[in-house]
């Protein structure tokens, strides 16, 4: 057994008995399926994922009644080499670069790696078994009941957050809740009381005459422990950990670490300072930064010209979706717009990730930023968030060349630069479509998976049926066009004095003949309503106090009249010329 990890000690016969118990229990568990302390894996997972699984199992208590042998109650089972309840085989732990089939070598490698991820490291043993009938090898990591909860993650990695405590609810891993922290604190108190009792019992031997005095001391020590636990619980409650719906629950592990620090005077200055910093860190800011870090790490891994651009694009879409979901919820919830500056800083970091290296940086590396900007701008408009809209005016796009220090406005340069490298890809994906990149953005943001549409205010989603058609029963395309039109106005703001301003190309500026002639009136109806009744937040961002959108409409007509159309397109300049000469609403003064 490895000395770094505590585990039950006993005679060789007892260890043999344990091995037999684990083997029999594992076969039974395969028939029952995964549970709170039972996890199945086809192959050994990467070390970060494995650390998360082991820590979550060690932090979870068994409610009893699941295991066949009661001696294994509250033990955790991570069974590797199984699929759908069947043993399919796993010979070695290639994810650890450990070709050995020896249990002790695999365990030593696991201990060495896991100590970098979990503190304190739970006790565990590693067993290699063979299926009874087929002799196919499989592995069991037996995690012993923990007396040292909580087990905290020490570093960030894919799907793993530093300073976070994970638990399992059923077969799913979650960050620990306030209920879990109360359980951890009770465990700490019980452990302290047990030590106090053991110490007292030892000192009482041979000292019968002092029994009363020592019992009174024991009572005092129990009272002190009880008061300490109450004090810690009050601190947690003051920080909002008393409710499961707390918006700060994501950082509850950090708050728990700070509270437990009061009971541990042996912590280093570095540990105490980190606890202090994390306890004052805004959970939204920290999580947003983590989402950006994840995207940047993925973008940094894209070093050369991809052999399959479509596959890379699909991966980029998948990696970008968590950020889009989070921003959608944030823009909806942040009515006071206090997080707008933090979102701006995050997007600046994402923009910088596109300014490194060669082809992939000049093209597909820009992709996560592009739908994020459209997603943020469209939602900011429909939720009436002027400070979020202003971000798109102030954000800059770093130069594509390392030797060029020039910085350009995010709109419209982001879209133009990305498409100049990738137009062949999108023309292949959307053959015959007018504005294939814009059509892609519409489908991604409003159709599948449609994350922008999902985060629209209910009044906008429900009102979309007013602009429906047989091909678009929910009126999503007309809603997208209004959002894209607003982004186009933002792109024109710094160019109003220019004779030939550069437009933000999109479906609002040019459409296919079929759409233009069959559904043109319906498609542009939302935009027509906007220019006749300009919303207050847009007036504020465009600085139009007492004015109409006439100057912007005229600039739009000039810009799209001179643009080179993509694919089979008809310019919408006639629509905006008609609107500029019609009844325009004025912004309030």
Image: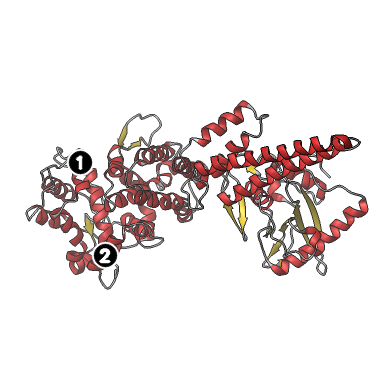
Where residue 323 appears, as percent x and y from the top left, is 43, 49
Where residue 435 appears, as percent x and y from the top left, is 29, 56
Is disc 2 surrounded by few (<14), some (14 to 19) or many (20+) residues within 10 Å? some
Q: Is residue 122 shown above or below 71?
A: above
Q: Residue at x 22, y 50 (%)?
A: 564
Is disc 1 surrounded by few (<14), some (14 to 19) or many (20+) residues within 10 Å? some
As rendered, which of 152 and 276 lies closer to the eye? 276
In which quadrant of the rendered view does residue 403 lie? top left
Image-based side of 169 in relation to 437, left or right: right
The count of marks equals 2
Placement of the C terminus among the 4 image quadrants: top left
Spatial distance from mark 1 to mark 2, Cα to Cα? 28 Å
Residue where numbered disc 2 is placed: 464
Q: How is the image coloured?
A: secondary structure
Q: Residue at x 78, y 58 (%)?
A: 72
Q: Residue furthest bottom?
A: 470
Where residue 263 appears, as percent x and y from the top left, is 65, 34
As rendered, which of 453 and 550 lies closer to the eye? 453
Q: Is residue 458 visible?
A: yes
Image-based side of 402 in relation to 575, left or right: right
As rendered, which of 400 and 57 lies closer to the eye? 57
SS state under label 1: helix
Image-based side of 264 in relation to 239, left or right: right
Q: Is residue 136 visible?
A: no
Image-based side of 350 in relation to 268, left or right: left
As rendered, which of 233 and 149 lies closer to the eye? 233
Residue where numbered disc 1 is placed: 493
Sequence-wise, the earlier of marks 1 and 2 is 2
Placement of the N terminus among the 4 image quadrants: top right
Report the disc number at residue 188: none
SS state under label 2: helix
């Amino acid at each position: 057994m490895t000395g770094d990890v505590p585990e039950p000690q006993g005679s060789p016969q007892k260890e043999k008995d344990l091995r037999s118990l684990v083997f029999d229990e594992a076969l039974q568990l395969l028939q029952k399926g995964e549970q709170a302390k039972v996890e199945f894996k086809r192959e050994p997972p990467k070390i970060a994922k494995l650390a998360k699984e082991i820590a979550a199992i060690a932090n979870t208590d068994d409610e009893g009644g699941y295991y066949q042998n009661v001696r294994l109650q509250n033990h955790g089972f991570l069974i590797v080499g199984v699929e759908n309840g069947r043993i399919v085989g796993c010979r070695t732990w290639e994810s650890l670069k450990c070709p050995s089939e020896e249990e002790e070598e695999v365990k030593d490698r696991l201990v060495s790696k896991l100590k970098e991820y979990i503190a304190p490291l739970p006790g565990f043993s590693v067993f290699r078994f063979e299926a009874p009938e087929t002799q196919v090898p499989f592995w069991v990591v037996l995690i012993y009941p923990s007396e040292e909860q909580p087990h905290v993650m020490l570093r960030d990695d894919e799907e793993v957050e530093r300073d976070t405590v994970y638990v399992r609810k059923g077969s799913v891993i979650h960050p620990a809740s306030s209920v879990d922290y109360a359980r951890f604190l009770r465990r700490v108190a019980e452990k302290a009381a047990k030590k106090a009792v053991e110490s007292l019992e030892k000192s009482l031997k041979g000292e019968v005459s002092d029994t009363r005095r020592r019992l009174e001391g024991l009572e005092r020590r129990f009272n002190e422990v009880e008061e300490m636990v109450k004090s810690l619980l009050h601190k947690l409650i003051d920080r909002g950990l008393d409710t499961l719906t707390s918006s700060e629950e994501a950082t509850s592990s950090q708050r728990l670490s700070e509270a437990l620090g009061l009971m541990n005077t042996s912590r280093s200055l570095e540990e105490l300072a980190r606890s202090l910093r994390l306890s004052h860190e805004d959970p939204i800011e920290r999580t947003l930064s983590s989402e950006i870090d994840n995207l940047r790490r993925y973008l940094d891994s894209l070093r050369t010209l991809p052999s399959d651009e479509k596959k890379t694009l699909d991966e980029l879409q998948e990696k970008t979706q968590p950020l889009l979901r989070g921003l959608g919820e944030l823009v909806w919830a942040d009515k006071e717009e206090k997080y707008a500056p933090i979102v701006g800083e995050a997007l600046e970091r994402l923009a910088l990730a596109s300014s490194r290296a060669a082809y992939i940086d000049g093209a597909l590396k820009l992709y996560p930023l592009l739908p994020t900007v459209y997603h943020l701008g469209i939602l900011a408009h429909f939720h009436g968030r002027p400070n979020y809209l202003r971000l798109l005016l102030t954000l800059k796009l770093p130069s594509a060349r390392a030797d060029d220090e020039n910085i350009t406005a995010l709109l419209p340069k982001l879209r133009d630069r990305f498409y100049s490298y990738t137009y062949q890809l999108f023309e292949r994906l959307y053959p015959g479509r007018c504005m294939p990149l814009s059509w892609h953005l519409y489908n991604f943001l409003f159709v599948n998976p449609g994350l922008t549409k999902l985060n629209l205010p209910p009044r906008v989603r429900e009102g979309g049926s007013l602009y429906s058609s047989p091909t678009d029963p929910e009126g999503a395309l007309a809603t997208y066009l209004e959002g894209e039109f607003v982004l186009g106005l933002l792109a024109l703001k710094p160019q109003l004095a220019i004779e030939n301003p550069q437009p933000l190309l999109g479906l609002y500026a040019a459409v296919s003949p079929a759409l233009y002639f069959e559904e043109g009136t319906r498609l542009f109806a939302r935009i027509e309503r906007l220019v006749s009744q300009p919303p207050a937040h847009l007036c504020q961002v465009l600085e139009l106090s007492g004015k109409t959108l006439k100057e912007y409409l005229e600039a739009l007509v000039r810009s799209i009249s001179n643009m080179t159309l993509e694919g089979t397109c008809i310019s919408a300049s006639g629509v905006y010329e008609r609107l500029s000469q019609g009844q325009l609403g004025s912004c309030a003064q």
